[in-house]
Every structure is written in structure tokens, then in C-alpha cells.
Image (cartoon, helix red, strand yellow):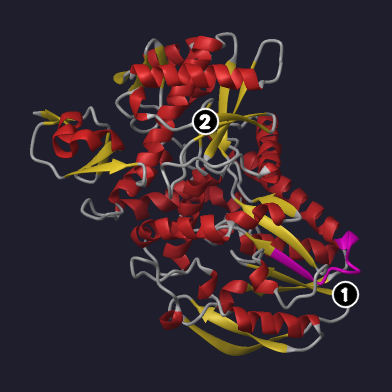
Amino acid sequence: MKVLHDLNKERHGNKAGNYLAAMVDNRLKSLDYVLYNPHQVQFIDYTHPDGRRTYIRSLSFLLQKAVQQIFPEAQLRISYSVGNSLYCDLVFPDNREETTEDMEKLYAAMMRMVEENLPFRREKIPTEEAQKIFLANGFPQKALLQKTRGHFFTSVYYLGDTSDTFYGPLVPSAGYLKLFDLCLFHKGFLLQYPQPDDPRQLDGPPRLHKLVEVFEEHVQWANIMGVKDIGSLNQTIQKGLTKDLILTAEAFHSRRYAEIADKIYRHRDRLKLVLIAGPSSSGKTTTSKRVATQLKVLGLKPLVLEMDNYFLNREQTPRDENGEYNFETIRALDVPFLNQQLAQLLAGQEVEIPYFDFFTGVRSFRGKKLKLGENQILIMEGIHALNPALTEKVPSGVTFKIYASALTSLSMDENNGISTTDTRMIRRMVRDAQFRGVTAEETILRWPSISAGERKNIFPFQEQADVLFNSALLYELAVLKTHAEPLLHRILPISPAYPQALRLLKFLSYFTPIFPKEEQYIPYESVVREFIGTIRPD
């Protein structure tokens, strides 16, 4: 018998503190896990995605403990990620706002626990007891989630006398959490954690105010709907209110599409090109089609140009450092040819646009021609659409820029958010398995490269958009669950994608499913259809 923590010290000596968790037979385990038999063990640090998640979960608990110590009268809310930070706020009885002095007090309290190396511990207890603990701590959302999930036992974590639950392992003790910061931001503050590419560095305060405003709008709308977390979503589905939930969420999207079209129409005399960008599986294709439809209602005649058709042939696609095709870099596109065709179209010329076949990896021409006429406007979508290099031949002042992303407004509970990246990865694996001949395993293995490309090529341009559109829908993960789970179950334990498959399966297990027969209520034009396709047979 051996504890992973001790094995880590034996293997790594003074560097043992760099490792935050471990993969035991391809399953993520905390360092207090006990080995009874021979196992394959890989220790992971902050450079590993699961290492980062372990660090961030633990850091969130450390902040919660500090709030309990310094401001016992306040309630901490941890909402969503903003860059390499978590957006948080404190709800005081007198509704006062946080101050710089508050941040200094909390930071000092957190550092004291780091220096004391206060241990984290976990207990597995009956769910009914866990619900009572969460309710006593002022966490009704957390209690509701456990109730609607319907499991007999729940893991409860402790830091001193503070208790909570988290959806993955924590580090052994606070001494592992040496780098973080707190800073005022927007209407609350940020809990900053190290950069994924350089664990020794923190970001400066992010300039993402437009992104936060979109998040806030959807959080407020979700609160009005009474579906602000997984527990309340599950409860709505379990009560048989799925149809109303779907139709109301879709109506909200329709209204936002119409508002975007109105903004474009007001400047129709000068605007000739609408650019729609966003990370992978953010709903860019649907956004372009829905905005186009709304522009038609206003009397304009939009033409949609899909950037994906300008991919280079597969053999010309650049490769990443691992030798894999890198589809996320702008160099995977035929940028000179795209600029040439855009310039011709805006000059009133007719062009034959290409078609890219994702199954064969070959670009061809099939006789489809475009020409801008009177009252016509060009819409182009793609992950790089806001990159200036893509439109360097386009005259300034004729473009309108839209940034689309799936900014999930749902939360797990009061202080555990849902990763927008996970939502997009699930969307992509469902779509690619169905329409592009790519397995879920391949999607997971490509995702680190995709994420690195997004951080480099997409996220830096998001605040340059004229408008940000949130393509996330309150109900979508309950739908994607039934499509994604069979794909994830096919991934074998020996696969390097297996740990992520297990993590996503656990995440999806918290959702009450919306079954295929209920998908009939999802409109054909919904962004969800971009990923699941048309109605499936029973």
C-alpha cells in the first residue's frame, strides 16, 4: 500500500510540490489516493489541463475560506472564467461594493493559509446529509443539484471547518497554491491564476469588458427564467416543461439576431461586408444564416461566404509541433486567394467560390458564382474573420464585425461555473462525428492544439467586434448529453483521450437528459441543429 503523495516525494524529491495530481491507469486522482496494487502512474503539473483544473478548484476553495474568515456576513459568488481568471463578487447585507482594501485583506488571508499549508480533505457521505450541509452553508443551488442528480453519496471537501463540494480532485494542501492575485474588475473582482503557457506568470487585468457584459446579460436572463444552474435546469425538465424552455430560449436568440440586423441596417449605406468570427464550435455558421435571414426581413439581400471553403488542400496544411495538421492557424487558409475574391466582390465583379470537402481534404470548384448587386451585403464567417490579415485588401469603414461564442450562462452551483470550452468541445465532437467523419477520441486529442490556436489567433481580436453574440442556449447540454455519451463511451481506457472522456462523462452525468423524442421542439434554424442535425428517429 502506498499513498500517491509519498510516491511523488520519492520520485521527484524537492520538485514534488510542482505536481498537483496524478493519472492512475489513465484516471485522474488526487495525491491522497492510496495504491493497493500495481498501477501505471503519471504525475501531472500545471502545464497539464487537469493539473490546471485541480489548481483552480483548490484556489476557489481557498478564496471561499478567506471570505468566511474576513467577511462572514458576505456571500461569495464565483460565476465564470474571464481570460485566466474567475469572475467573482461579494454580496454584502448592505449591498456595498468591493474595495481595494477588501482585496488586500482577502489576499493576506489566503497567503496565511498557503504559508500554514492548511490541508484539504475529502469525505464521502450520504447525499441527504450533504444536502443539509449545503443548505446550512447558504448553498441551495448546490443542494438542489445533488437532489436532482439522484446519487446515494456525495463527496464533501473540507478546508479547516469550511465545507463544500467540487467536481474533481483538489491539491493536498494550501501550500501548493503559491501564485494568484485578486483585483477589482467590472462590478466585482477577479481571482487570477497562472497562464497555461507559463505557470510562473499571471495576466494583467484583462480588457474584456464587452465579453463580461454579454455574460452578465445572459446570467440576468437565466435568473428571470428561473434556470440559472444545472439543478434548476434538471428540475424544469423533470417537471415536463422542456417544450416551453426550448421555445423561450430560442425566442431570446431570435430577438438578439434581430437586434444585430437592425444595427447593420442603420448603416446600410456604407456597410458591404459583415464579418463573423469566434472560436471552434461557437455557432458561427448558424449566426451568419440567422443574421442573413433578419437582414432579408429588413429588405437587404445578404450573400453568405463560408471561410471554411478557403482551407488549403490537406497536404498543404501546416502542422503543429507534434506533427499533426494545424487547422486552427490562419496559415491553414489560402489568405491571398480569399483577399483577392473579397476585393473582386466588393468591386462588383463576379467570382466562382470554392468548396472544401472535409472528408477528402480537397478544395474544388463546382460552378457556384457570387456577385454583389443592389441592396446586397456580403456575410463571411470563420474563426479568423476578425483578424486584420484576412481582409487587408478590403477598404476600411465597410465592415461590421460580430464575435460569436458559447458563453454558457448556466453554473454548476453558487461557486462552480461551467467551462465554455467544455461546451464547445462537446458541440464539436457531436458535430464532427456525425458530419465530418472524426471520432470523439480524435476531437479530444486535437483540442489542446485547438485551444492554443484560439488563445493566439482568435481571443486577442474579440474586443474589436462591433457586437458580441452569445450562442449558448440554456437547454443545449441536456440535449447534447444523449448524443455525446455514446461517443465518449467508445474511447478505450488505454487511449490518451480516456481521462478527458471520463471527465466529460462525469460532467454530463449531472444533467437530466432531453431525449430524442423531445428534440422535435428544437427549431430547424436553431444553433443546436448545427451540431446534432435534424430530428432523429425514436
- State the residue at coordinates (13%, 34%): 10
Residue 57 is drawn in which quadrant?
A: top left
- Residue wearing tag 1: 375
* Left or right for 326, reference 285: left
- Residue wearing tag 2: 181
Element marked by disc 2: strand
Residue 348 is drawn in which quadrant?
A: bottom right
Tell me where residue 449 appears, x and y as whole percent.
42, 60
Element marked by disc 1: loop
Magenta-span inclusion, residue 273: yes
Q: Which mark is residue 296?
A: none
Q: Nearer the viewer, residue 92 or 144?
A: 92
Circle 1 residues within 10 Å: few <14, some 14–19, many ≥20? few
Tell me where residue 224 appears, x and y as whole percent.
70, 30
Residue range of the region highlighted in magenta in the rendering: 265-275
Magenta-span inclusion, residue 14: no
Tell me where residue 16 appears, x and y as whole percent.
23, 35
Tell me where residue 485 appears, x and y as whole percent.
38, 49
In the rendered image, is residue 149 in sight?
no
**Given the image, on which type of amino acid does mark 2 rest?**
Asp
- State the residue at coordinates (62%, 64%): 285
- State the residue at coordinates (41%, 56%): 448
In the rendered image, is residue 71 in sight?
yes
* Left or right for 139, reference 360: right
**Given the image, on which type of amino acid does mark 1 rest?**
Asn
- State the residue at coordinates (63%, 18%): 101
Circle 2 residues within 10 Å: few <14, some 14–19, many ≥20? some
Calculate the distance from the C-alpha at mark 2 to the C-alpha at mark 1.
52 Å
Q: Nearer the viewer, residue 327 or 141?
A: 327
